[in-house]
Amino acid sequence: MTDRKPVRRLVAVTLDEASIGRSSPDIEHERAIAIYDLLEENSFGPAGVDGGPYTLAVSLADGKLVFDVKHEDGSQVVTHVLSMTPFRRIVKDYFMICDSYYDAIRHATPSHIETIDMARRGLHNEGSETLKERLKDKLDFDFDTARRLFTLISVLHWKG
């Protein structure tokens, strides 16, 4: 028996470098981990499209979120453009709490860090659910994939 990965998955993810603002080392670390984790384990595919695996390019264009999905060979599958409006508050709050979390790691008690981390995970989950809702009937992906994609969206949106 071979250990084969499913075909309805992502094998490459790129972020538009022009969309990414200058980021702190903590944000760059989050982005690198999200991409690594996403490629290691994901469930992803365009709704109603057989085949795969897929590549995904994520960018911002005219204030909108762009998901460009292609087959592994580079042939176009679909592009989805979403308004960033539903994500703006969540992303803003998420990065405020992330800043508090990274500061707490350096200076706070373990119980204080845990409290902040719970709030951070709650906002992250909210963003992930919003992403799943906005792309339902367009892209199929599981919650863990949504969490990693939300991290990437946050990095694109954050110009810190």
Image (tube, rainbow, N blue to C red):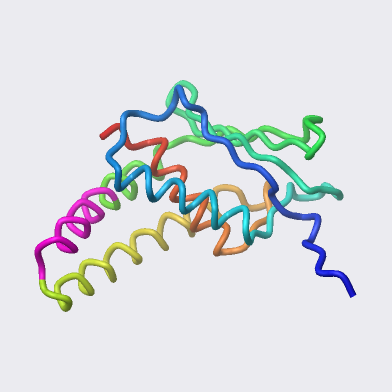
Residue 84: percent from the left, percent from the top?
A: 43, 37
Residue 118: percent from the left, percent from the top?
A: 28, 71
Above or below, 111 against 42 in this view is below
Q: Residue at x 60, y 36 (%)?
A: 67
Q: Quadrant of residue 7?
A: bottom right
Q: Look at the image and say whether residue 99 sits in the magenta stretch.
A: yes
Q: Which region of the structure is painted magenta?
A: 95-108
Horizontal placement of 2 versus 11: left or right?
A: right
The quadrant of the image that shows the N terminus is bottom right
Q: Look at the image and say whether residue 74 sits in the magenta stretch.
A: no
Residue extending furthest front?
2
Residue 109: percent from the left, percent from the top?
A: 11, 74
Horizontal placement of 155 versus 99: left or right?
A: right
Q: Residue at x 66, y 43 (%)?
A: 12
Horizontal placement of 20 versus 106: left or right?
A: right
- Foreground residue, 28 or 143? 28
Q: Residue at x 78, y 48 (%)?
A: 53
Residue 47: percent from the left, percent from the top?
A: 75, 50
Residue extending furthest bottom?
111
The quadrant of the image that shows the C terminus is top left
Magenta stretch: dominant SS? helix
Count of residue discs: 0
Q: Quadrant of residue 141?
A: bottom right
Residue extending furthest right?
1
Horizontal placement of 146 versus 31: left or right?
A: right
Q: Residue at x 78, y 39 (%)?
A: 72
